[in-house]
Image (spheres, rainbow, N blue to C red):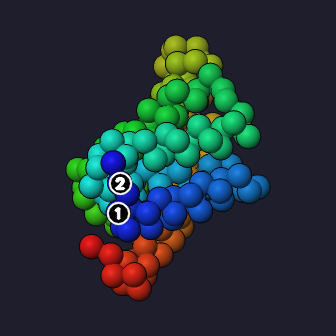
Amino acid sequence: MSINKKERVLISFIIVAVLVRLFPHPPNFAPITAVALFAGTHFSRKHWAILMPILAMLVTDVFLGFSMISPIVYLAFAGVTTLGFVVKKMHVGSVLLSSLLFFVFTNLGVWFLYYPLTPEGFITCFTLAIPFFGYTVVGDLFFSAALLFGYRYAAKRFQLA
């Protein structure tokens, strides 16, 4: 299976975004949700789109560490990529929906793994997660814009299909 010019450019943008995850950053201000949505809206091969954020996480988690929540986080990113298949375009609404999907899915996992499975445990878990959601939204908007506008520029410059 060969990789065309468009796919090479897409992969290069994702690699740069992934490397950024390894730099110090505020909690949840990271590029992977943007990578997942970007892959879902830009890759024609759906299995590649699903694989991109998962590989990004696996590679960076080798350096940053794995946790009990890692499988749930990976599934959340697969969900964001699937959302990209459905919405087909990156825009503020799809980015915010991606942020919300990731927040809800991962915090349900945190609640299930680390808190009492009671209404009080649920409320405590989600209440304590709210400050992280702000970083998530800002990071997702920033990295989505960087990926989208960077790719649009490259697509014009290199005449990608």
**Does 124 sit above or below residue 56?**
above
Q: Which percent across, then down, holds residue 10? A: 43, 63
Residue 49 coordinates in the image, percent (x, y): 37, 48
Disc 1, disc 2: CB below 8 Å?
Answer: yes
| Coordinates of residue 150 in the picture (x, y in percent) | 47, 75
Q: Disc number at residue 99?
A: none
Q: Residue at x 58, y 29 (%)?
A: 70
Tell me the quadrant of the picture where the C terminus can be found.
bottom left
Q: Secondary structure at mark 1?
A: loop
Image position of 108 with respect to 5: above or below: above
- Mark 2, residues whose alpha carbon is within 10 Å: few (<14), some, or many (≥20)? few
In the image, taking residue 82 as reference, residue 145 lies left or right, namely right
Q: Is residue 158 above or below residue 121?
A: below
Amino acid at dot 1: Asn
78 or 59, which lies in front?
Answer: 59
Q: Label 1: how many residues lie within 10 Å, few (<14), some (14-19) or many (20+)?
A: few
| Residue that protrudes farthest toward the top in the picture | 117
Residue 106 can be seen in this image: no
* Amino acid on which disc 2 is placed: Ser
Tally of numbered tags: 2
Residue marked by disc 2:
2
| Residue ID at (44%, 63%) | 8
In the picture as drawn, the residue positioned furthest to the right comes out as 24
**Residue 4, label in figure:** 1
| Viewer-side residue, 153 vs 12 | 12
**119 or 40, which lies in front?**
40
Determine whether the residue tagged by mark 2 lies in a helix, strand or loop. Answer: loop
Q: CA distance from mark 1 to mark 2?
A: 6 Å
Residue positioned 51% across, 71% down in the render: 146
Q: Give me the residue at 59% from left, 62% from top.
A: 16
> Residue 35 location, x and y as percent?
47, 55
